[in-house]
Every structure is written in structure tokens, then in C-alpha cells.
């Protein structure tokens, strides 16, 4: 599967100030470190960037592409900044993201064919966050239809069902999985992408990787194509590269309702089983879910 590194992010303690001060070094170091970790795209998240977003984006894209050949995922809600980034980007960029708000669609959708880019279709509608898998389907059909009208082929549309924190709403975590199982039928040929770290937002830092990795394995059951990830979680990268087949099949067994014999399992495997049950909504989430 395709991995998109999330670490070039305005929220980060090193990257935020570097973007503001136009300091190339921390940004180039991060880009090189993410490339070395094995991701295929670099997400460049400059936040809403309402003022001067175009200059920051153009500068950051050029700065990053001086040290890596990887394509970038241009992550901001400011359409002017997106276009400024596309203008200087070498190779095929990924626009992150285009949602279904009419003004955003109108401004941003034409950028996809104009710059021969691909796009993340974010399933966020006029009424905000979709409530369940069915609302996600309606939004997906809508965005694919509107993109196709402009000549954008399905292979250039990466659908993002929006992953939400497990500590906030377990039903949304389940809805995102359920939607993934339906995507292939409602939008054949489209790709899929999930912001994996969202799932563990607000949970203890040392436990976040268990949630991120487990949700990844669960989404893989439904053929997830790509994910925006912490490039510096080596175990997550191994899972994504297909190097943990036994663990992945264990998680899938639990999803199918099987009850593996605990005496045959390692303590590490038991942690993943517990986490799978939390993300399925079978066990209530608490910050100490691995202890119970
Ligand atoms: N879908 C799409 N784009 C997205 C998201 C998505 N872009 C933003 C986000 N979600 C994915 N990127 C991140 C980046 C960082 C973190 C989570 C998601 C994160 N960072 C740590 C924190 O905030 O605690 C550490 C920050 C740091 O580096 O210091 O959790 O869903 N299309």
C-alpha cells in the first residue's frame, strides 16, 4: 500500500516555526528522514493558512523538492495556497483535500485537470461530518460524479471517509470501516486514503501506535489503498509493507468473530487483540484499555 508521511506539519514544534521563519533546514531534514523511513508521498500541512498561504506553500514545496524526489500531498483548506504549490511542484501532486462544500468544489476541482494532479475527495458535506456509512456513500457518489464531469478519472480520486478519534465516537470509527467495505462497489477504480493518526488523537502518547497500527490492519481487510501516517513508527511501516502477515490475519480473525486461544498468543499479540475489540466497539475505550 501507499504511505503518505504526516510529519511535515504546522502543528509540529520544529516544523511550525520553520515554516513561519522560512528556515529550510528543519524542513529539509524532516523531508529526508521521512523519505528514508520508506513513505511514498510527503504530506505538507500548512494549516488553514488564510494569510500569505500561497507564499508559504510555494516556498515549502520548492524547499522540500530540493532534497527529495517524492511527490507531495498539499494539505491546506486555502485554495490559493494549493494552486501556488501546484505551480511549482515537480511531478504529479496530490491535492489534500477537496470536500463537498460548493465554494470549495468550484474553486478547487478545476485545479486537478489544470495541473494534472490527483485529489483527495474528503467526505465532508454541506452539513459537515457524515453521520454514518450511508451518508459517506452519498457524498462519495456525489464527489466522484462532479469530478468525472470535469474529466477527472476515478484513478485520480482518492476517497477519504474521515477517521475520527476512538476516544470521541466509536460509532464513527465503525462507520469509517463499514464505508471502506462498500467503496469498491460504489466508486470502482477510485483509491482510498485515511488519516490514520486521527484515530488515536487525545490518547496517551505511548499507546497511540497500538491504535494506529490496529486500525490500519482492520482497514487493510477492506483493501485500504493508502494512509497518512507517522513516518517514524517502523512497526506500522512493516505492517503496511506486508511484512506482518501473521499479525494481520490474527486481527482479521478477531473481526470475523473468532476467539483465538490466548495460551497460544504472545503478550504483544494479546495487546493487538484487545485493541481490535476496542475499535470494533466490543470493548469500551478507556485510556487503560490494554490493562483490562
Ligand atoms: N485526512 C486528510 N488529511 C489529513 C488528515 C485526514 N491531514 C491532517 C491529518 N488528518 C493527518 N496528519 C496528522 C499529522 C499529525 C498528527 C496527526 C495527523 C499528530 N501529531 C502529533 C500530535 O498532534 O500530538 C505530534 C505533532 C508533532 O509532530 O509534534 O497527531 O484525516 N485527507
Image (cartoon, rainbow, N blue to C red):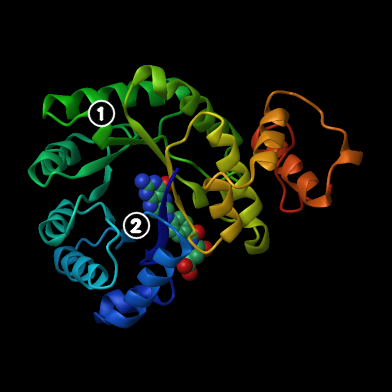
Badge 1 element: helix
Front residue of 227 and 36: 36
Q: On the rendered structure, is 12 left or right of 77? A: right
Front residue of 63 and 126: 63
Q: Which residue is mark 2?
A: 43
Mark 2 and ligand 1: say if the CB distance to the nearest ligand atom is below 8 Å. Answer: yes
- x 12%, y 42%: residue: 107
Q: Which residue is mark 1?
A: 154
**Placement of the N terminus among the 4 image quadrants:** top left
Q: Look at the numbered discs 1 and 2 and tell me whether their residues touch, using CB distance below 8 Å.
A: no
**One can see residue 132 in this view:** no
> Toward which corner of the image does residue 143 lie, by quadrant?
top left
- x 18%, y 29%: residue: 147
Q: Report the disc number at residue 162.
A: none
In the image, residue 100 lies at what x, y percent? Answer: 26, 33
In the image, residue 72 lies at what x, y percent? Answer: 28, 57
Farthest residue to the right: give it: 263
- x 68%, y 36%: residue: 251
Amino acid at each position: 500500500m501507499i504511505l503518505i508521511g504526516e510529519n511535515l506539519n504546522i502543528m509540529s514544534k520544529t516544523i511550525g516555526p520553520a515554516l513561519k521563519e522560512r528556515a529550510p533546514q528543519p524542513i529539509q531534514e524532516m523531508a529526508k528522514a521521512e523519505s528514508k523511513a520508506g513513505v511514498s508521498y510527503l504530506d505538507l500541512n500548512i494549516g488553514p493558512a488564510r494569510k500569505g498561504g500561497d507564499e508559504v506553500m510555494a516556498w515549502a514545496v520548492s524547499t522540500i523538492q530540493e532534497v527529495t524526489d517524492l511527490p507531495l500531498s498539499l494539505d491546506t483548506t486555502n485554495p490559493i495556497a494549493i494552486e501556488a504549490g501546484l505551480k511549482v511542484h515537480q511531478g504529479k501532486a496530490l491535492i489534500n483535500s477537496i470536500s463537498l462544500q460548493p465554494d470549495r468544489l468550484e474553486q478547487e476541482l478545476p485545479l486537478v485537470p489544470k495541473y494534472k494532479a490527483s485529489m483527495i475527495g474528503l467526505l465532508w458535506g454541506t452539513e459537515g461530518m457524515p453521520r454514518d456509512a450511508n451518508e459517506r456513500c452519498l457524498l462519495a457518489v456525489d464527489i466522484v460524479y462532479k469530478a468525472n464531469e470535469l474529466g477527472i478519472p476515478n484513478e485520480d480520486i482518492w476517497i477519504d471517509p474521515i477517521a475520527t478519534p476512538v476516544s470521541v465516537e466509536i460509532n464513527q470509527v465503525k462507520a469509517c470501516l463499514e464505508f471502506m467495505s462498500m467503496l469498491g462497489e460504489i466508486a470502482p477504480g477510485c483509491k482510498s486514503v485515511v488519516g490514520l493518526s486521527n484515530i488515536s488523537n487525545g490518547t496517551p502518547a505511548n499507546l497511540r501506535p497500538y491504535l494506529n497500527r490496529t486500525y490500519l490492519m482492520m482497514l487493510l481487510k477492506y483493501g485500504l489503498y493508502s494512509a497518512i501516517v507517522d513516518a517514524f513508527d517502523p512497526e506500522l511501516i512493516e505492517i503496511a509493507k506486508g511484512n506482518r502477515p501473521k499479525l494481520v490475519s490474527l486481527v482479521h480473525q478477531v473481526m470475523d468473530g473468532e476467539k483465538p486461544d490466548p495460551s497460544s498468543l504472545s503478550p504483544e499479540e494479546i495487546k493487538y487483540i484487545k485493541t481490535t475489540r476496542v475499535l470494533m466497539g466490543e470493548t469500551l475505550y478507556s485510556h487503560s484499555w490494554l490493562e483490562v
